[in-house]
Amino acid sequence: MSSERFKHEILPIRQQLFRISLKLLEDEDDAEDAVQEVLLKLWRARESLGNYENLAAFATTVTKKSLS
């Protein structure tokens, strides 16, 4: 996945990931840190992200698993 595609498909769901993290962590700073970690994980795995049909759902799953 190119950096442009990553920006176009992943970054727009950042707020969604933040809301999920905030609900689970109940602290804005911790939620922001969690989202940054998830985005970094997704960036590192960007070559395989094309295998997923619904990237928002996959990113949500990664977020929830990272926080459990």
Image (cartoon, rainbow, N blue to C red):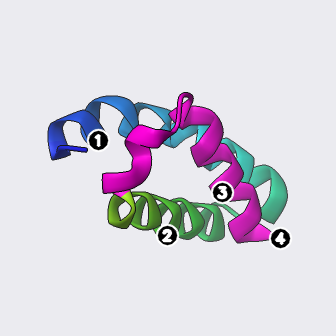
Upstream in the sequence, badge 3 or badge 1?
Answer: 1
Residue range of the region highlighted in magenta in the rendering: 46-68
Residue shown at 75% from the left, 64% from the top? 65
Q: How crowded is mark 4: few (under 14 residues within 10 Å), some or many (20 or more)?
A: few
Q: Which of marks 1 and 2 is in front?
A: 1
What's the amino acid at mark 1?
Phe
Residue 40, compared with residue 51, is above or below; it is below
Secondary element at tag 4:
loop
Q: Are marks 1 and 2 in contact (CB under 8 Å)?
A: no
Residue tagged 1: 6
Q: Residues within 10 Å of mark 3 (few under 14, many from 20)?
A: many
Q: How far across and down, in percent of the image, does residue 52 sit?
A: 52, 38
What's the amino acid at mark 3?
Thr
Residue tagged 3: 63
Q: Of helix, strand and loop, which mostly describes the magenta segment?
A: helix
Secondary element at tag 1:
helix
Upstream in the sequence, badge 4 or badge 3?
Answer: 3
Residue tagged 2: 37
